[in-house]
């Protein structure tokens, strides 16, 4: 299995600040990495697929970068609705795996 | 707009079989442009992919669960289903069904990401 390690575990920021989340893979996943946001009591929402492509309806303040083993999700200026837990997920290797998550909370 | 809805018992006894169904609306499983997946999340923990199926009943399973899991499809009802046998407390989780599209934003070969999800259903394994 490919293990995805996310850091930091928790990010405390204020609205308007920039958020930078990291995901590291135990072996190369190429560009086949997605990012999801999950709010309490809700299903995850796809933000980014294939490392840098925004899913339908996702605002431009969300961007993804990276390839191989190191990936970054950036939220350029946090809106109140952007807080929650963010997960990365790889599709390079079947079984598909998710990272452990980064919680972005209001400072 | 594709919508998915999970249904099934919220409580299952240890050693028994967990059975859930996902009903798809706003899109047809038979269109063949997606796989249909099950993902679970133990309370307070992360996400685990269980497996996926398409309209021809072709399946992919998580190797760690493969021996206990079966996913099936009923295209006439636009539903797909999950069975997990010999459950233990470790199978207690919110179970989500989700769409795994083969095409996203007019790009092919995007299988393995999940763009539409059900709301999830909590299944507790307890006697």
Image (spheres, coloured by chain):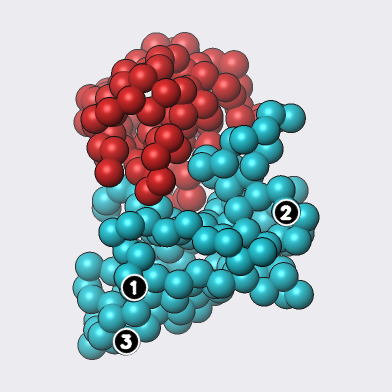
Chain colours: A red, B cyan
Res. B43 image quadrant: bottom left
- Chain for disc number 3: B
Res. A107 image quadrant: top left
Q: Is residue A67 above or below residue B22?
A: above
Res. B15 image quadrant: bottom left
Seen at 59% across and 36% down, the residue is B110
Which of the two residues, A56 or A50, is positioned nearer the viewer here?
A50
Q: Which mark is residue B32?
A: 2
> Residue B58, position in %: x, y?
58, 61
Can you see residue A21?
A: no
Q: Secondary structure at mark 3?
A: loop
- Chain for disc number 2: B
Q: Is residue B34 left or right of residue A10?
A: right
Seen at 39% across and 40% down, the residue is A93
> Residue A59, position in %: x, y?
60, 22
Among the two numbered marks 2 and 3 on one chain, the one whose residue lies closer to the N terminus? 3
Among the two numbered marks 1 and 3 on one chain, the one whose residue lies closer to the N terminus? 3
Q: Is residue B106 left or right of residue A70?
A: right
Return the residue at label 3.
Answer: B16
């Amino acid at each position: 299995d490919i293990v995805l390690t996310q850091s930091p575990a928790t990010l405390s920021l204020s609205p308007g600040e920039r958020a930078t989340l990291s995901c590291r893979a135990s072996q190369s996943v190429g560009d086949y990495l997605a990012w999801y946001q999950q709010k309490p009591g809700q299903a995850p929402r796809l933000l980014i697929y294939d490392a840098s492509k925004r899913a339908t309806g996702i605002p431009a303040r969300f961007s993804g970068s990276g390839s191989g083993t190191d990936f970054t999700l950036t939220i350029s200026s946090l809106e109140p609705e952007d807080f929650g837990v963010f997960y990365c997920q790889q599709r390079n290797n079947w079984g598909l795996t998710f990272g452990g998550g980064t919680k972005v909370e209001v400072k | 707009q594709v919508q998915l809805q999970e249904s099934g018992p919220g409580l299952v006894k240890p050693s028994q079989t967990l059975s859930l169904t996902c009903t798809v609306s706003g899109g047809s499983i038979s269109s063949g442009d997606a796989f249909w997946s099950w993902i679970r999340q133990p309370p307070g923990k992360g996400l685990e992919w269980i497996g996926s199926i398409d309209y021809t009943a072709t399946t992919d399973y998580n190797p760690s669960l493969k021996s206990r899991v079966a996913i099936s499809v009923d295209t006439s009802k636009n539903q797909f289903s999950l069975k997990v046998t010999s459950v233990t407390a470790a199978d207690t989780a919110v179970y989500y069904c989700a769409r795994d599209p083969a095409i996203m934003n007019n790009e092919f070969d995007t299988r393995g990401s999940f763009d539409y999800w059900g709301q999830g259903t909590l299944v507790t394994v307890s006697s």
